[in-house]
Image: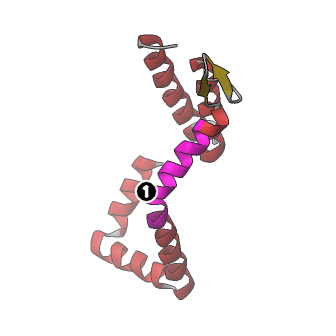
Amino acid sequence: MTGLPLILVFVLAIVLMIVAISKWKLHPFIAIMSISLLLGLVAGIPITDRMVDGKKVSGIANIIGAGFSGTFSSIGIVIILGALIGSILEATGAALKLADIVIKLVGKKTLLRLSSRLF
């Protein structure tokens, strides 16, 4: 599948992923993995590696794995350090102190109004 039909299927997959995560409360990792697998199948990517006309065509698992490794090689350190700093802030109580400072600066009513719009 190529061209406009592939773009339409891709847009549909993005919409389905957003609905699955926000409305159906499906875990984001499961939603991303399952929808990317379905999109690969619809696009015509083979499930396993194959030889086509003397060329090796990668399967869905290798393509998804290459995507994850590419993402983690570029932003993996940032994610790991962010999680580390977040856990340190939580363990030391600094996260609660930061929340108190934000509440004092912005005001409780403003935060409640913003949170009601988001959720």
Numbered marks: total: 1
Q: Quadrant of residue 30?
A: top right
In the rendered image, the vertical position of residue 32 relative to residue 87, given as above or below: above
Q: Is residue 32 visible?
A: no
Residue farthest bottom in this picture: 92
User: What's drawn in magenta, residue-wise?
Assistant: 63-78
> Where in the figure is residue 109, as x and y percent of width and height?
35, 63
> Where in the figure is residue 3, as x and y percent of width and height?
42, 13
In the rendered image, the vertical position of residue 73 relative to residue 85, given as above or below: above
Reading the image, the residue beneath label 1 is: 74
Which of 46 and 38 lies nearest the eye of the viewer? 46
How many residues crowd around disc 1 within 10 Å: few (fewer than 14), some, or many (20 or more)?
few
Residue farthest left in this picture: 105
Which of 83 and 69 lies nearest the eye of the viewer? 69
> Is residue 36 a member of the stretch shown in magenta?
no
Kind of residue at disc 1: Ser
Residue farthest right in this picture: 48
Which of 26 and 53 lies nearest the eye of the viewer? 53
- Which residue is at 34% across, 73% downward? 102
Which of 35 and 51 lies nearest the eye of the viewer? 51
Q: How is the image coloured?
A: secondary structure
Q: Quadrant of residue 101?
A: bottom left
What SS does tag 1 mark?
A: helix
Residue farthest front in this picture: 54
- Which residue is at 32% across, 61% downward? 110
- Which residue is at 44% across, 65% downward? 78
> Is residue 65 a member of the stretch shown in magenta?
yes
> Where in the figure is residue 86, as x and y percent of width and height?
50, 74
- Report the magenta stretch's main SS: helix
Q: Is residue 27 left or right of residue 12?
A: right
- Which residue is at 57% across, 19% downward? 43
> Where in the figure is residue 21, as x and y percent of width and height?
58, 40
